[in-house]
């Protein structure tokens, strides 16, 4: 899992811009709408909605925005019908890439994703072509603002986490996918605030890119995918060097 925290860090830095935050709000809003449609508008009986509300708050989505999305979805104000589709493929030099989309038009989204892969030196593959290279894990990220390493380790183990990666800027807590909500809630009760708390696909091994052209194309592939409103998550096996992460 080496290198995963680095991606959490750069993702956090990118999402501090207003434009990136707006996209995050849009994508979480779409997930909330689907959860309300599938399980109702009461988070106490809809665990998926409860998790998404926590995710929205961790991403600083205002409470009034969350309430508005829930009411709209519950009242059939949003007529779009979304479905989740996972695309798999390879970036430059064989970097494994998984793309999770939530779309109301699978033909449009598939065309966009294929275009990005083709344009930036990769290729879109069949379902299952790279997913075996990833493991689903619950990933909770906390901004490290003077938190004691001993204390967070003790608290995480007490709350049922599997592992903790302590770094100067962020702390990454790893859980089994099904344990993520309970660990997150237990840590929240202890006063911790989260940058993110999601089930993510974590690469088993990482691929390094040494050619400048490959690095540039990989960066542009990821940027294009993440800019697309239909795409909720992008996971990859690129071990981006530190200097790239700091840009």
Image: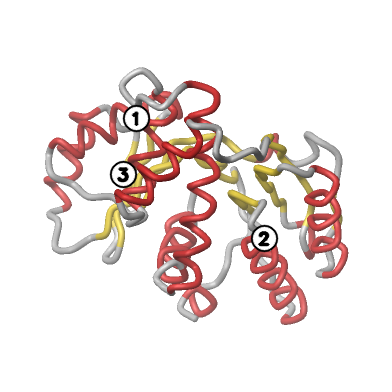
Closer to the camera in the image, 97 or 52: 52
> Dot 2 lies on which element?
loop
Q: Which residue is disc 1 drawn over?
A: 181
How far across and down, in percent of the image, does residue 51 sit?
A: 38, 34
Residue at image position (70%, 51%) is 97
Q: Are marks 1 and 3 in contact (CB under 8 Å)?
A: no
Neighbour tally class for label 3: few under 14, some 14-19, many 20 plus, Cα within 10 Å: many
Q: Nearer the viewer, residue 156 or 22?
A: 22
**Which mark is first along the chain, 3 or 1?**
3
Decide which of 75, 43 is in the foreground and name it. 75
Classed neighbour count for the residue bearing mark 2: other residues with Cα under 10 Å, few (<14), some (14–19), many (≥20):
some
CA distance separating discs 1 and 3: 16 Å
Q: Nearer the viewer, mark 1 or mark 3?
A: 1
Task: Give the residue drawn at x 45%, y 29%.
Answer: 177
Residue at image mark 2? 228
From the image, state whether disc 1 or disc 2 is nearer to you. Answer: 2
């Amino acid at each position: 899992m080496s290198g995963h925290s680095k991606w959490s860090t750069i993702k956090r830095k990118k999402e501090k811009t207003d434009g990136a935050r707006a996209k995050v709000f849009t994508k979480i809003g779409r997930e909330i709408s689907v959860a309300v449609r599938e399980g109702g508008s009461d988070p106490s009986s809809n665990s998926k909605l409860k998790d998404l509300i926590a995710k929205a708050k961790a991403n600083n989505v205002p409470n009034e925005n969350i309430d508005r999305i829930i009411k709209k979805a519950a009242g059939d104000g949003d007529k779009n019908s979304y479905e989740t589709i996972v695309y798999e493929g390879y970036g430059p030099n064989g970097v494994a890439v998984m793309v999770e989309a939530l779309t109301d038009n699978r033909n449009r989204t598939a065309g966009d994703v294929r275009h990005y892969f083709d344009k930036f030196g990769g290729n879109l593959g069949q379902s299952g072509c790279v997913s075996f290279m990833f493991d689903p894990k619950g990933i909770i990220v906390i901004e490290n603002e003077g938190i004691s390493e001993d204390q967070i380790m003790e608290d995480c183990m007490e709350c049922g986490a599997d592992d903790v990666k302590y770094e100067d800027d962020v702390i990454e807590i790893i859980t089994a996918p099904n344990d993520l909500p309970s660990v997150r809630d237990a840590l929240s009760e202890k006063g911790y605030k989260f940058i993110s708390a999601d089930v993510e696909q974590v690469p088993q091994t990482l691929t390094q890119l040494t050619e400048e052209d490959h690095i540039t194309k990989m960066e542009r592939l990821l940027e294009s995918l993440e800019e697309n409103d239909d795409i909720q998550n992008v996971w990859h096996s690129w071990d981006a060097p530190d200097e790239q992460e700091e840009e």
